[in-house]
Image: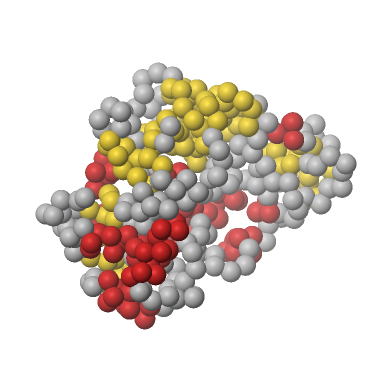
Amino acid sequence: MPERDHRVAVALSGGVDSAVAAALLSQQGQRPRAVHLLLSDGGPPAAHLAALALMLNLALTRVDLREEFARLVVDYFVSEYSRGRTPNPCVQCNAAIKFGRLWQLLQAQGLTRLATGHYARLLPGADGTLGLFRAADRGKDQSYFLSRLPRELLANLLFPLGDLTKAEVRRRYRELGLPVDEQCPESMELCFIPRGHYQDFIRARRGPGTPGELVDLRGRLLGRHRGLEHYTVGQRRGLGIPAGEPYYVAEIHPESNRVVLGRRQEILCRGLRAGRVNWLIQPPRGDLEAQAVIRYRHPGVAARIRPLGSAAVEVIFAAPQSAVAPGQAVVFYEDDRVLGGAWIEEPIK
């Protein structure tokens, strides 16, 4: 339970999770201030947000971060695809916007804690230091998306839903009698693309991609691609290559406008190199054994993490992995504790 002398803000999206998080804080004796982020056009109706805040007995403030979101998240998303990489906008948004720019604004107003509806837990680790842990509901766990938060920020955060299941959260929402808005769907990773395909969104912002060659790992021509934005490493569907054994996207080369395909065994990698490491523990001085999660919903693989200076790591898997996509986040776990994360730069074949 947070101390009573802390001034707490709760991010209120308009959905079930953040509303129940706010209600739980109130039940603990807090009087949190509700903050709704304006990140892009659309979002929940103002009337729904106002009704929700009223029933929760919360003062509501709207914070317009659309310009920062467009620059730090949307532009990043489009740029990564143009570089042949696979972006993760939710990881980027949490670090740069929700727990970045918003936290700066809240601090300037004298607030000392930020609560959200994320499914994750903050607990003392075996070393006695505060750590970020997976949620009790492993099916809804969002700790992967929080791997780039500054370690020093953890003490200022609250995740009231960390010990609850999604079913329990929905039940509590109904018991509170809170208003239901059918136009306010479950949160999604691409919240700025509520309708249509992300490829259409990219083309609308930078123009259509240039068709090019589909080749195998030996450089043999297999067909033509429709533009690099249609492809991600590990992709199987939509390649348009008839074959008895399926092909997968193995590599994307924007400099030559080529997409390289391989059979399943050919796209397996024994490791990866990653940069811009963010540690949520004391940075290790030597090799570290941990579970490496190379994309959301990846089950994780035992790995050896070797620091390459202060900002990069080499990760060697205990068993080869497929779909090691440059641009994605790799997150390191010890049991349920998040040790840190980094951006994947290249696979190690």
Q: Which residue lies furthest to the top in this view?
A: 286
Q: Which residue lies furthest to the left in this view?
A: 5
Work out whether residue 120 or residue 252 is closer to the camera in this orientation and state it.
120
Q: In which quarter of the image is the C terminus?
A: top right
Q: Where is residue 75 in the image (x, y as percent from the top left)?
A: 49, 57
Work out whether residue 78 or residue 1 is closer to the camera in this orientation and state it.
1
* Residue in the image at 47% along x and 45% along y: 138
* Residue in the image at 23% along x and 73% along y: 57
Work out whether residue 59 or residue 226 is closer to the camera in this orientation and state it.
59
- Please give left or right for residue 109 compared with residue 95 in the image: left
- Asked if one can make out residue 297 in the rendered structure from this viewpoint, the answer is yes
Work out whether residue 67 or residue 186 is closer to the camera in this orientation and state it.
186
* Residue in the image at 43% along x and 32% along y: 335
Q: Which residue lies furthest to the bottom in this view?
A: 47
* Residue in the image at 41% along x and 67% along y: 15
Q: Please determine whether, in this image, residue 135 is positioned above or below residue 283.
A: below
Q: Position of residue 12 (x, y in %)?
A: 34, 65
Residue 298 figure quarter: top right
Q: Position of residue 313 (x, y in %)?
A: 47, 27
Q: Where is residue 62 in the image (x, y as percent from the top left)?
A: 30, 70
- Asked if one can make out residue 211 in the rendered structure from this viewpoint, the answer is no
Q: Please determine whether, in this image, residue 158 is positioned above or below residue 329.
A: below
Number of marks present in the image shown: 0
What colouring method underlies this structural image? secondary structure
